[in-house]
Amino acid sequence: MMRGADGYFYVTMTDLHIFAKEIGYRDTEWERPAAQYDWGNNKGLVLMKSKDLLHWTHTRVNMDRQFPELNIGCAWAPELIYDQQLRKMMIYFTMRSGKGKTKLYYSYLNKDFTRPETKPKILFEYPDTTRQILDADITRLPDGRYCMMYVAQENPSGIKMAFSQYINKGYQYQPDQVDFESRSCEAPHVYQLIGKNEWILMYDIFGIKPHNFGFARTTDFKTFTHLGRFNEGIMKTDNFTSPKHGAVVQLTDTEMERLGQYYKGR
């Protein structure tokens, strides 16, 4: 989820249900045969837009139909960022061709926020081609550069950074992982603290049971201070348990009041 420069809220999601067969939503484990397309082989992304967080437009994008030449094996973990130079919303996501390795791609969305209008292109190439990369999250820094957090499926999977002067190319590999975990992590998300030159890195520690989120603080995207996990440090949960792939968006008091009234007693 993100707040756009136009005041609207934008959401993009993976159209993937890992437990759909168990719950009874479909008869097969995945949408397509795993022998041909591998694990989690969904091919759709979801786009949603709202002015008030209560009423939403909703579009399912069938990536395989729009781009059949790509032989899409999966489309996961989409994120959004506004390209100020092109004045377009950029969507970037994890994708693989057939049963190949997952890589990071980007495309630009149309002005109605209903479909990609450009063919997906590679966003970043990992130097070790035997490893999968996924779950990118891009932050525009005060000096104009872009920092991309992403997951490298090393042993264990962890959070790495790459920097670029450009939003959609030129990201430079850095070898160090920036999470503080000995078990596998994914789904990094970075948000800035209100009124401060401080950013919080949040990530999903899926390699532990029960899974939890980890947090780190930075002011320069060079050094990070460990903040611990949910309910094991300063970060606390309130009305949810077992979160997965989280995102943070800042709201005004008026927006919070409106949401509170709407969901009161529901």
Image (spheres, rainbow, N blue to C red):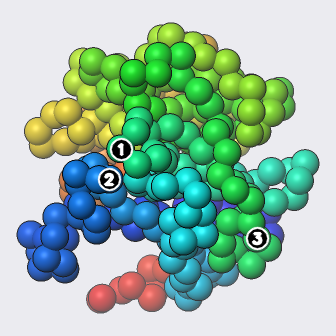
* Position of residue 180 in the picture relative to residue 148 (left or right): left
Inspect the image, locate mark 2, and give the three-letter code of the amino acid beneath it: Tyr
SS label for mark 2: helix
Residue 182 visible, this orientation: yes
* Position of residue 81 in the picture relative to residue 266 (left or right): right
Circle 2 residue: 37
Q: Which residue is drawn at 22% across and 24% down?
A: 183
Nearer the N terminus, badge 2 or badge 3? 2
Inspect the image, locate mark 1, and give the three-letter code of the amino acid beneath it: Lys
Q: Position of residue 192 (x, y in %)?
A: 62, 41
**CA separation, marks 2 and 1?**
5 Å
Reply above or below: 255 against 238.
below
Nearer the N terminus, badge 2 or badge 1? 2
* Position of residue 85 in the picture relative to residue 121 (left or right): right
Circle 1 residue: 99
Circle 3 residue: 110
